[in-house]
Amino acid sequence: MTTFLGMPATSPRGVGHLRGDEPFPVAAHRALADDQLRRNLRHATTTIRGKSGRVIAELPDWQELRSAGSAIKADVMSRLPSLLEELEARVVERGGVVHWAADANEANAIVTGLVKQTGSDRVIKVKSMATQEIALNEALEAAGIQAVETDLAELIVQLGNDKPSHILVPAIHRNRSEIREIFLAAMPGVDPALTDDPPVLAAAARKYLRETFLSTTVAISGANFGIAETGTLAVVESEGNGRMCLTLPETLITVMGIEKVVPTWQDLEVFLQLLPRASTGERMNPYTTMWTGVTPGDGPQNFHLVLLDNGRSAVLADEAGRSALHCIRCSACLNVCPVYERTGGHAYGSVYPGPIGAVLSPQLTGVEDNASLPFASSLCGACFDACPVKIDIPSILVHLRNKAPHKAAERAAMRVAAYTMDRPELYARAQRAAKLARIAGRRGRGLPLGWNEARDLPEIPEQTFRDWWASR
Ligand code: SF4
């Protein structure tokens, strides 16, 4: 049977970066032992949190904006197929070509084929989570095509043969002396006298990238938003590299997750206020590039839009989990998460780290393939409070914990507990038995699943509520 876009299939195994090589606790344990990593993370997340908090406090209607963003996204999910068809029709009317990719394999094949048709063996890229998710760079490389990341942090990650560890600040785990080492080792034409002064490092990247921008004819981007009523795509960024990629080349290929569609232009009014404040702590992001199909004589003359499913329809099919698709990738939930701040992004194994990764990755892959991620949280709720589109991440985490595979002994223990709690007489007898166990000094011992390894069983009281009640 063939899988079509829109059928609720999860992301296929063996391709892309949604699954880690090891469970979260194992990877987190290693990350926690890295003092430098923890210092870098603490500094970066604290700085971004402070900046973001200050500019959010300037807006008296922040909560109303959050509610509006949440409502727009819920509306989008309720009529996603028709909005996508509307977007397709408008893009085609304006001279673009739309491709539908059911999964990572299809998307990679489509993009690789399109680049080959141009005859180019090099592409420039705007930072894009969707293309990282499907491992597009690796697919291009296998086809003999070099992909050059043009976002500075993404370039650092690429030259260091590394993986991004933050949605917005992919090289958050690197400090400036490490970046200098990476540039000296891998950046073509770099000055051997390079210092670790940030302006000097930025100038070195700028020189290398300018030459690449001016000599490459194909660009690949993601999209922050796709506007159904006009067929307009939007990318927001801070460095201007996106603007160069989206305007200079002859051919532009955009890979967009199907959840990024919004109904109207006016909806951007909400998201362009929410996104920069929640992500980089800016009132407005420095560069917002929008384009609609092809404009003769101005910008790329060939435009392809690849609409990517890769498990999103499966997320949409789950009523309790689908709001994870509302995410606008601002990374605010990462910056406030006590777990992320200590482990960093690599421990999550997926390109989507932190709280949003803990709910999105298991849904895209099927919970069994990322079973430890829903447990990578203290359920403190800070992510929910910080999310500019009000995604209730803690509730989705609990929902996914229930769906995750559990050990047979745990399942059996829960069945016994449910049976007992359902029957008052039996429950009273169990309480009496627990009291006896306490007197016998067996507190915590004999609990199933090693629960008492990580937490203490509360002291069982001398008198139960039932006894207290009966005595009166
Ligand atoms: S879940 Fe919310 S806070 Fe986290 S990245 Fe997405 S939009 Fe931002």
Image (spheres, helix red, strand yellow):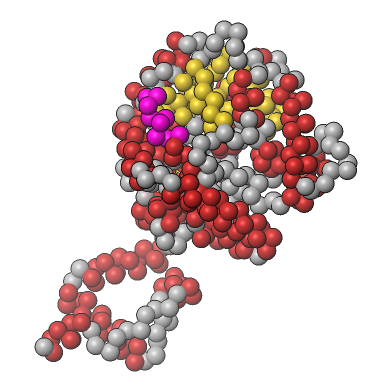
Quadrant the N terminus occupies: top left
Is 289 a magenta residue?
no
**Residue 312 percent location from the top left of the image:** 43, 36
* Quadrant of the rendered image containing residue 110: top right
**Residue 257 percent location from the top left of the image:** 48, 31
Is 269 a magenta residue?
yes
Quadrant the C terminus occupies: bottom left
Whether residue 20 is situated above or below residue 31 in the rendered picture = above
- Residue at 37% x, 38% y is 69
Q: Residue furthest right?
A: 192
Q: Is residue 356 visible?
A: no
Q: Residue furthest top?
A: 296
* Quadrant of the rendered image containing residue 407: bottom left
**Of helix, strand and loop, which mostly describes the magenta segment?**
helix
Q: Nearer the viewer, residue 460 or 95?
A: 95
Residues shaded magenta = 264-272
Whether residue 86 is situated above or below residue 194 in the rendered picture = above
Q: Is residue 391 visible?
A: yes
Q: Nearer the viewer, residue 403 or 334?
A: 334
- Left or right, residue 27 beside residue 11: right
Q: Residue furthest bottom?
A: 439
- Left or right, residue 134 beside residue 274: right
- Residue at 69% x, 51% y is 174
- Residue at 43% x, 78% y is 456
